[in-house]
Amino acid sequence: MKCTVHWMPGTGMGFVAETGSGHLLTMDGAPDGGGRDLAPRPMETVLAGTGGCTAYDVVLILQRGRHDVRGCEVRLDAERAGEDPKVFTRIRMHFVVAGRALAAAAVERAIALSHEKYCSASIMLGKTATIETSFEIVEV
């Protein structure tokens, strides 16, 4: 996996990342750090990527188990250390999984498998952060 991050000097603290798959991701800093608040902060993209990683796993695990999953949302709330390096110290993830006749045990298992075995991002962040998960099921 490769990624190239380019600083855009005219923006203050704006950056564009070009991923190995050819996609672009824009990031910016807060005004008090020289940014213009035009895009997510780099650490916000880390948190968003972690949510995407685990949601991907949960949906795939449920689909492979032939469960009728129709939607998956992950609401993340993170806390960071007060001093540098300001690593994540606590991350709460609340999954809202929609489908037809989804068993709570299947959803709980999919989330656990993601966090214990498959989601590289949450497993990495789990080295510095306590990760808490919860879920609800919405019948559609």
Image (tube, rainbow, N blue to C red):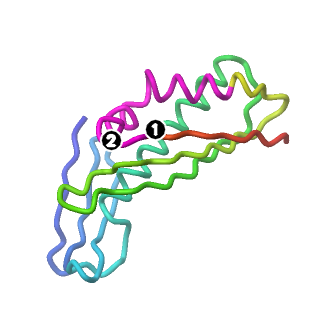
Q: Position of residue 28 (x, y in %)?
A: 29, 70
On whether residue 113 falls in the magenta region, the answer is: yes
Q: Is residue 133 left or right of residue 24?
A: right
Disc ID at residue 91 = none
Q: Quadrant of residue 40?
A: bottom left
Q: Position of residue 1 (x, y in %)?
A: 25, 34
Secondary structure of the residue carrying numbered label 2: loop
Quarter of the figure with the C terminus: top right
- For the stretch drawn in magenta, the main secondary structure is helix
On whether residue 125 falls in the magenta region, the answer is: yes
The three-letter code of the residue at mark 2 reads Ser
Tell me which residue sits at (27%, 41%) in the image: 20
The three-letter code of the residue at mark 1 reads Cys
Q: Position of residue 16 (x, y in %)?
A: 26, 62
Tell me which residue sits at (18%, 72%) in the image: 8
Q: Which residues are magenta?
A: 107-130
Q: Quadrant of residue 121?
A: top left
Q: How much space separates mark 2 and mark 1, taking CA atoms? A: 16 Å
Q: Compared with residue 15, is residue 79 higher up or lower down, i.e. above or below?
A: above
Residue under label 1: 53
Q: Is residue 73 left or right of residue 49?
A: right
Question: Which of disc 1 and disc 2 is earlier in sequence?
Answer: 2
Tell me which residue sits at (25%, 82%) in the image: 32
Disc ID at residue 21 = 2
Secondary structure of the residue carrying numbered label 1: helix
**Counting other residues with Cα less than 10 Å from the Cα at mark 2, is it few (<14), some (14-19), or many (20 or more)?**
few
